Image (spheres, rainbow, N blue to C red):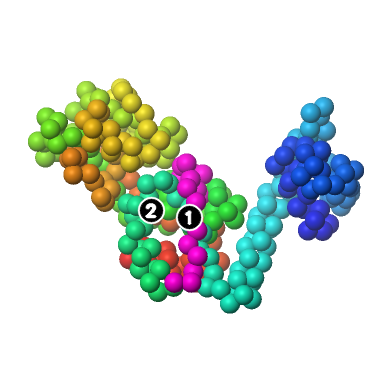
Amino acid sequence: MTLDDLRVFVAVCEAGSLSAVARAMSCSQSAVSQHIKRLEREVGLALFERRPRGVVLTAAGQVLRQAATEGLGGLDAAVRRLAEMGRGEGGTVRITTGATSVRHFMSRSIVDFRRRHPDVVLEFQTGQSSRQCMETVRDHGADLAWVTIGPPIPGVEQRPVLELPWVLAVHVDDPLAARTLIRPADLAAIRHIALPEHSISRVSLETQLARWGVRPTASAGVADWDTAFLLAELGICQAIVPALPGTPEQVRLVPIAGLPPLTAGWAVRQWAALSPLAVEFAKTMTE
C-alpha cells in the first residue's frame, strides 16, 4: 500500500469513476485499476462495487476512505508547512466561516494579527453553513472555523466563545421599534424572514419558538444574516436574528424575552495539533 495507491483511491471515491480519474491523471484506466486492485489485495476486501456507469464504495471502502482522507489531509498540511519553513516564509492560517462573519466578528482581529505578523498569509474560505465549515476543518481544508456552535461532529472539537442574544430587527419606523422588549407570543404575527434552511441558527430558533407554540409564517427567505438585516433596513420584513456588531443605522434591535442565546465559537480538528500561528489568531479574536 503506497501513498499513490491511497491518493488514487480517494480520487476514485470523489469521482465515482475509474475512467474519469484516468483522464484527470493523463494515464490509462488500467493503471488506475491497478492501484485499486493492490489495495483490495492488501485489505482482503472489495473496496468498490462496479456498476455500468461507474463505481460505488462498499462498506469496507467507506472505512478506508475516511482513514485515507484524514491521513492524506494531515500529511499534505505538514508538507505545506515544511515547505513554508524551508522558504523562510511566515506560514499560512486558513480560516473558514460564513459570509457575514469576517465583517461582523473578525475585522479588528485581522488588523491586530496582521500588524504583528505581516508575512503570514491569512486565507479565508466562505462556507454556506456552520456544518459545512466544520466539515471543511475535519477534512483538513482549513485550520480554523468560526461557527455557530451546534451538535457534535466526529473528528471536530468545538469551543464556545460568545453568546448572541436573539433580537427582532425592524426598521426604525416600524411600530415595533418603540418596544423595549418582545415576547415570543408577539412573533406569531410578524412578517418573518426565514433564516437559511437546515442551518444551526434556524433549527435552534424554530425549536425554541415551538416550545412557546409559535410558528411565524415566513414572507421571505435569506441565505445569510446580512441579507436579513438588509430586508429589515428596507422595511420589507422583520427578522429574528442574533444580535451582531455593526447593525445598520436604520435598523432597531428589540430584545426578545425567553429565548436562549445562540452560541458562536471556534471549531478545529484538535487544538493540540494547531500551528502556533493558528492558535494566536484564534486567541486574538477571542480576546
At label 2, the amino acid type is Val
In the image, 235 versus 3, the foreground residue is 235
**249 on left or right of 139:** left
Q: Are marks 2 and 1 in contact (CB under 8 Å)?
A: yes
Residue marked by disc 2: 102
Residue beneath the point at 21% across and 30% down: 235
- Position of the N terminus by quadrant: bottom right
**203 on left or right of 75:** left
> Could you tell me which secondary element the residue under label 2 belongs to?
helix
**233 on left or right of 282:** left
Packing grade of label 2 (10 A; few <14, some 14-19, many >=20) is some
Residue beneath the point at 82% across and 27% down: 52
Residue marked by disc 1: 124
At label 1, the amino acid type is Phe
Up/down of 74 relative to 132, above or below: below
Tell me where the magenta segment starts and ends, as one range.
118-134
Where does residue 159 sit, x and y in percent of width and height?
42, 57
The magenta stretch spans residue 171: no
> Which badge, 2 or 1, comes first in the chain's sequence?
2
Task: Name the outermost residue toward the left.
Answer: 178
Q: Quadrant of residue 231?
A: top left
Residue beneath the point at 79% across and 28% down: 53
